[in-house]
Image (spheres, coloured by chain):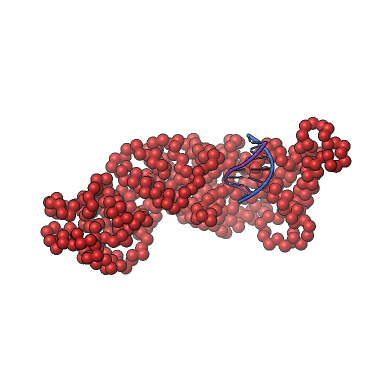
Chain colours: A red, B blue, C purple
Amino acid sequence: MQETVPSGAKSSSDDHVTQSGRVGECLKPLDGPLEGGSSTSTGCISSKPDFSKLKGEICLDNLSIKELHEVFKATFGRDTTVKDKLWLKRRIAMGLTNSCDVSATTFVIKDNKLVKKDNEDGFNNVNLGAGKEHLAVAVEYNEDLLNNLSSQIDEHQTTSEVRLGNNVVENNFASEDLAADQRAAKRVRKPTKRYIEELSEAESKEYSGRSIASTKSIGFRPLSSKAHARPARNVSLEGRTVNTRLDSLGGFGIQVPCVYRIRRSRPRKNVTALLKFHPSGMGMTATFIKKGFDVHGSQMDNGSMNKVLEAKSTPEQAPEQFVAESKKETTPTDMGQNMGLKYVDPSGDTSDDNVVTVPTAKGGIRRKHHRAWTLSEVMKLVDGVSKYGAGRWSEIKRLAFASYSYRTSVDLKDKWRNLLKASFAQTPTDKGANSRKHPSMPIPASILLRVRELAEMQAQASLPNLSTGKLSACGGRSVNETRPGYL
DNA sequence: ATTAGGG
DNA sequence: CCCTAAT
C-alpha cells in the first residue's frame, strides 16, 4: 500500500529537500515511508498500533492520510476518523513532542523534537544522541497514563484545572478528541432525573467504603481522586463510566478505553439489604445460566437467584459497580471464569440484583435490571391486590412487599398488568396452555384464574352505580375504597 | 410521590 | 423493565 504513494505525489514543495541531502531527515521516510515499513508492510490490517512507525525520524509531510492514521494509532493507541491531514500532523506532532507548540506547517519529528525542514535548526539538530528509544518509551508511557486518566475524566473536561505535569496537556486533548468522536457518533439524550439520582447514589455508595468482596482491587481510587477536580460533578452523562481494560495485544500492554455503565440500583430504603449485598452472577456462561434456572425451579421461593445474564464474556458484562475498580489486575475473562466457578449462595436474601445488557437498535447497549418474578412474589402480589385493590400499589408494596427491596410499586403495577393479560389471553382455550414451548415460566393456572377473578371484581367495583345499586355511593370515600377481597 | 400507560 | 405524562 505504501508504495502507492510516490514521492512525487506529495506536494512539490518538499521533494527538493531530500535531494539537497544536507541533513537527510526525510530520507528514510521516502525510501520506505516509514522505517520498518517493509517488515510490517504485509500487515496493514493489523489492528494494533504499530509502534515501529514511531521509530526514527518521522516526516509527517510525506505521509498519506492512511499512513498518518497509522502513525496516529501508534502514537495514541487508538484510531481516528479525522481526514484532515494538517490536523493529523499537528495532532501527532503534539502527541510526540508532548507539547502544544506545533505552530509549524511542516512536520519532521526527531528525538522528541519538532524539526522544521528548511530551518537551520534542523542542521544543528542532526545529532542523533539517545533519542529514539526515549521516544518510543515516552510514547508508550504517555499512552498508559493518558488512558488511565482519561478514563477518569468525565466527558466534559472537568479536569481542565488538574495539574499532573506535562501530561495534562495530552490528556485534555485526548478527552477532547474522544468527546468529539462520540459526539459525531451519536447525540445521547439527556439523562432523566432518575438516572442522575441513581448514579449519584451508586457513587456515594462507592465512597462510603463498604467492605466489599474480598477480591476488590483498589488500584484506581487514588488516581481518580486526583483526576477529578470535582468528584461530585464526575457523573458522566447517561450514566456511563469510562474505564480501561488491559489488552494483551502483542505484548504491548495497550490500554483500550471501553465503556461501562454503573449498576442501577432500585432499592432506596432497606439498608440491611444493602449490607448483605454481594457481587454475584458475573460473567456467567450459558451453561451456568441453565444451572441457575434449575435451582430456581426447585426452590422458587426467594427472589434472589433468578439471574439471567447474557452469555457473553464482554467486559461490559460485569454488573456491579466494582467493575469500576477491578481491572488492570484481572482481565475480563479471568474474572468471568472465577466468578462463574464460585457462584455462591442462592440463599434467600432479597437484595442483590443483576444486570443484563440489551442491544439497542441504535447500536448502543444499555443495561437493565431483570429479575424474574418468582411464584411467591406473584402470589403475594395477587393477594395484595385482593386485599387492597388493584391500583393501590404503593400500599401493596408497603404492606405485602415490605421484604422485597426491589419491586417498586411500578413493578407491581406492571406485573399485574402482565398477569391480567396472561390470564385473559390464555384461558379461553386450554390448548393455549399446552402449546407453550418455553419452559420459562410455568404460570400456575390457579393463580391466573384467581387473577382473572380479581380483575373482574375490580372492574365491577369501579362501575358501582350500574350494578344492583345498593352499595354504590354510600360508605367511606371513593369508589376505589371497596375491597373486593373482603366484600 | 403515585398512578396509568406506552414502549 | 423503562420512561413519561398526569394527578
- Is residue A256 in sight in this rendering? yes
Q: Is residue A352 above or below residue A292?
A: above
Q: Which quadrant of the view contains residue B3?
A: top right
Residue A168 versus residue A465: which sits nearer the camera? A465
Q: Is residue A327 left or right of residue A447?
A: left
Q: Nearer the viewer, residue A344 or A84?
A: A84
Q: How many discs mark residues in the rendered view?
A: 0
Q: Is residue A346 above or below residue A11?
A: above
Image vertical order of residue A214 relative to residue A33, above or below = above
Question: In the shown orientation, is residue A24 left or right of residue A456?
Answer: left
Residue drawn at the location 65% of the way across and 52% of the way down: A296
Q: Residue at x 21, y 64 (%)?
A: A30
Query: Residue drawn at (57%, 56%), measured in percent from left and top?
Result: A288
Q: Say above or below: A459 vs A108.
A: above
Give coordinates of residue A34: x percent, y percent: 25, 62
Q: Is residue A198 visible?
A: no
A421 with respect to A67 (left or right): right
Q: Residue furthest top?
A: A476
Residue sitting nearer the eye, A86 or A98: A86
Q: In the rendered view of the protein, which quadrant contains the C terminus of chain A? A: top right
